[in-house]
Amino acid sequence: MRQVDSSATMPEWLFPWPQFDPDWTRCALIIIDYQNYSSNPDSGLSLVMKEYYPSIANYYLPRIIQTTIPNTRKLLQRFRALKMSVIFTRHGALLPDGSDLIERRQRREKDALAACKNPAMWSKGDFEHEIIAELEPMHGELIVDKNSSSPFNSTGIDQLLRNLGIDTLLVTGMATDMCVETTSRDAADRGYNVIVAEDAVATFVEQHHYAALSGISRIFGKVWSTAEVLEALNALS
């Protein structure tokens, strides 16, 4: 979908939708937190969901396995073929004891361990922290480690993007209503053009997915399908 359907979701909305013509020569693909803890069906949160929240697992796991990871891979392959910028983010504590996280996150980790004997996230250096094999970064592709939902709040990604001459971000990854949404809003507020690939992002509850995309498309950026992005990129070659 080119935009979340305004006529269906916000028929009384008075302000214009975000408008820009993407300059694909200045666009980077950002792949957010497709890590083993979040996106590997045999690891991390997937095991917790299967045991404690099967209804969530039954929605989330088929979506990432059958739809969002394959679509992200298609976009990644096209960006690589065109020699366009690709940036991966990884979410988690940078220190093994998690002391670099904000206090609220530290409390959440303790609560998660008490509830299900697993953390909510894993630390840098753990297998669960690594990017999934299906989207393994190549030599020369940036990997940004963050300990906040948005890399703009805990890393130098803004400077990196400006050094690279990037003004447009194509956003993929997880979770739609958490790190994807926060990153997209932060990028837009810093003046970047933002496109979210709807079928290359996922979260645990379907309603939250569409609510997040609705908010992004109303103010902060555009929401396209993978097919629409590939169509635009194919016109470059």
Image (cartoon, rainbow, N blue to C red):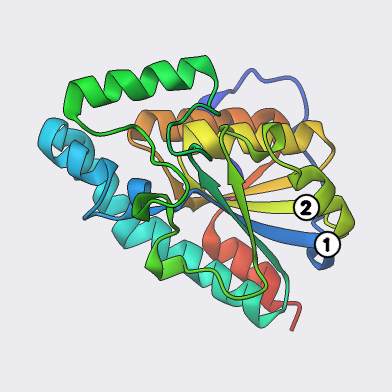
- Residue 175 percent location from the top left of the image: 45, 39
Quadrant that contains the C terminus:
bottom right
Question: In this figure, which residue is indicated by the disc labeled 1?
Answer: 26
Where 1 falls versus 164 (above or below)?
Answer: above
Residue pictured at 54% horizontal, 65% vertical: 227
Q: Earlier in the sequence, mark 1 or mark 2?
A: 1
Considering the numbered disc 1 on the image, is that residue within a helix, a strand or a loop? helix
- Residue 62 percent location from the top left of the image: 25, 53
34 lies left or right of 10: left
Q: Are marks 1 and 2 in contact (CB under 8 Å)?
A: yes
Q: Residues within 10 Å of mark 2 (few under 14, many from 20)?
A: many
Q: Is residue 5 visible?
A: no
Q: Amino acid at mark 2?
A: Thr
96 lies left or right of 11: left
Q: Is residue 81 visible?
A: yes
- Residue 234 percent location from the top left of the image: 67, 77
Nearer to the camera, 31 or 56? 31
Q: Amino acid at mark 1?
A: Arg
Residue pictured at 33% horizontal, 36% vertical: 204
Where 150 falls versus 224 (above or below)?
Answer: above
39 lies left or right of 61: right
Question: In this figure, which residue is indicated by the disc labeled 2?
Answer: 168
Where 141 falls versus 161 (above or below)?
Answer: below
Residue pictured at 67% horizontal, 20% vertical: 13
Question: What is the number of the mark on residue 195?
Answer: none
